[in-house]
Amino acid sequence: MTATMPINDPPPLLTVDGLTKHYDRHVGCAAVSFTLWPGEVLGLVGESGSGKTTLLACLAGRLTPSAGAVRFRTRAGAVVDVHRVAEPERRRLMRTEWGLVHQTPRDGLRLDVSAGANIGERLLTAGERHYGRIRATALDWLAAVEIDQARIDHRPSTFSGGMQQRLQIARTLVNRPQLVYMDEPTGGLDVSVQARLLDLLRRLVSDLGLAAVLVTHDLGVVRLLSDRLIVMRAGRVVEAGLTDQVLDDPQHPYTQLLVSSVLSV
């Protein structure tokens, strides 16, 4: 994919400045800075322990950084510091302006209620109260993520892993957030299921004009979905740029190692 980089218009959706997270003496991530524009997908790659998951948690407001700032531009045009805004406002933003797709779909679903209720609950938190509209929207989104609409009253515990992940995506996107954080969204799935899910994610990102931050260890996934790429090692950014350029002509020895290890498999 090739990104068209805006210069002045539109303004950045997300601005990250010197983001750092320490766990006692261990560095989770250190001095990470980047900007993300509307409709752009940014990939974060690196081996386990590289800091990408810590970084994602700080971006999404799930972890408080030790230093630095994450600034998000709302639909209304206000720029808010994700970690300085009042907690009720941050929860509202998490329900309406951004979403998180977990690697394990059970972490992002309620298994004790129906598929329709999982989607409908997200609508309720955003202020929708009309039952008919909620159910109709849930049916539409089940179809959008390729789940049989007849399963609307079935619990997610009866779904396969791939179906649970697609349901989690529907639940996350139903309020049409501006920004989605995705943590290894195809991890742990069979190859054929991964391919189907990747096609679905690519279509939804394009159709909805979503911006996304994608954490993955799979360079094939990041090449397919992301416009730009950040490579992390030991909590620090070692290389960044357009995805195809970084993967086709890696400059840092660590990135070269990542790419060569994939090619040699």
Image (cartoon, helix red, strand yellow):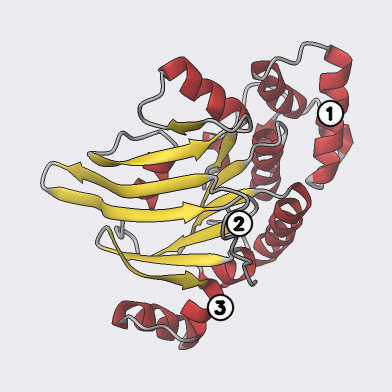
Q: Earlier in the sequence, mark 2 or mark 1?
A: 2
- Disc 3 packing (10 Å; few <14; some 14–19; many ≥20): some
> Distance of mark 3 from mark 2, alpha carbons?
15 Å
Q: Which residue is mark 2?
A: 40
- Whether residue 176 is situated above or below residue 132 in the rendered picture: below
In the displayed orientation, state which residue is furthest to the front. 8
How far apart are the two marked residues, 1 and 3, measured between alpha carbons?
37 Å
Identify residue for label 1.
137
Is 31 situated above or below 175?
Answer: below
Q: Position of residue 152 (x, y in %)?
A: 82, 29
Please give left or right for residue 164 compared with residue 93 in the image.
Answer: right
Lateral position of residue 96 relative to residue 88, left or right: right
Q: To which residue does mark 3 refer? A: 244
Say whether residue 184 is visible: no
Q: Quadrant of the N terminus?
A: bottom right
> What is the secondary structure assignment of the residue under circle 2?
loop
- Image: 182 above or below 60: below
Dots 1 and 3: beta carbons under 8 Å? no
Decide which of 51, 192 is in the foreground and name it: 51
Q: Are marks 2 and 1 in contact (CB under 8 Å)?
A: no
